[in-house]
Image: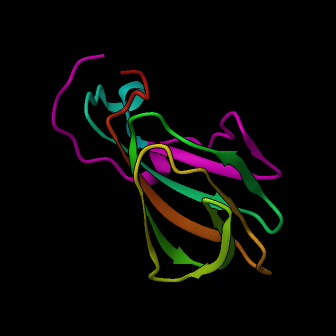
C-alpha cells in the first residue's frame, strides 16, 4: 500500500471483530499497514458491547497504550484485575499478559496505540 498523508473520518473505516476478540468486541484500524501503509504504528478505536472481551494474551515486542473514552470494563494485567473507565490510560510493555472485558451496561469505547505494528522480532 502506498504511504501518504491523509485526513480520514472514522466513519470511512469499517468495524472488524479481530481474532481473539469475542461477543461484539469491534475495532476500526484507523492507522495500520492495511489501511494506511503504516510501518511503525497501529492506531485503532475499539467499541466493546456489554460482555464483549478480548482473550488474555501478551505481545513479544510490541508496546501498547489504551485510552478509555467512555464506558467501563475489567482489565486484567499480569493476573491482577482492575476496573477501567473514562480517561484511564493503560500502558502495557512487551510480555505482560492482559485482557479486557466490558462489564458495564453500555459500550466500552477506547483507543489503542501499538508499536511496532508487527509482533515479530
Task: Say if the magenta span includes residue 15.
Answer: yes
* Above/below status of 69 relative to 45: below
Quadrant location of the C terminus? top left
Nearer to us in this view, 119 or 37:
119
Q: Is residue 104 left or right of residue 111?
A: right
Q: Is residue 74 left or right of residue 93?
A: right
Task: Say if the magenta span includes residue 88.
Answer: no
* Above/below status of 3 relative to 47: above
Q: Is residue 49 left or right of residue 90?
A: right
The overriding secondary structure of the stretch rendered in magenta is loop
Residue 92 locus on image (x, y percent): 44, 56
Residue at x 64%, y 78% (from the top left corner): 82
The segment highlighted magenta reads 1-29
Residue at x 83%, y 51% (from the top left corner): 23
Residue at x 69%, y 74% (from the top left corner): 73
Residue 84 locus on image (x, y percent): 59, 78
Nearer to us in this view, 2 or 93:
93
Amino acid at each position: 500500500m502506498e504511504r501518504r498523508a491523509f485526513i480520514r473520518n472514522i466513519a470511512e473505516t469499517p468495524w472488524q471483530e479481530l481474532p481473539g476478540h469475542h461477543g461484539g468486541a469491534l475495532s476500526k484500524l484507523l492507522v495500520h499497514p492495511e489501511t494506511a501503509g503504516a510501518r511503525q504504528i497501529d492506531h485503532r478505536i475499539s467499541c466493546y458491547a456489554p460482555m464483549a472481551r478480548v482473550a488474555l494474551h501478551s505481545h513479544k515486542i510490541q508496546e501498547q497504550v489504551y485510552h478509555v473514552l467512555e464506558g467501563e470494563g475489567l482489565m486484567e494485567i499480569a493476573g491482577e484485575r482492575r476496573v477501567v473507565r473514562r480517561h484511564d490510560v493503560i500502558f502495557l510493555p512487551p510480555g505482560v499478559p492482559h485482557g479486557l472485558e466490558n462489564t458495564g451496561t453500555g459500550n466500552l469505547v477506547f483507543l489503542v496505540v501499538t508499536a511496532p505494528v508487527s509482533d515479530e522480532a
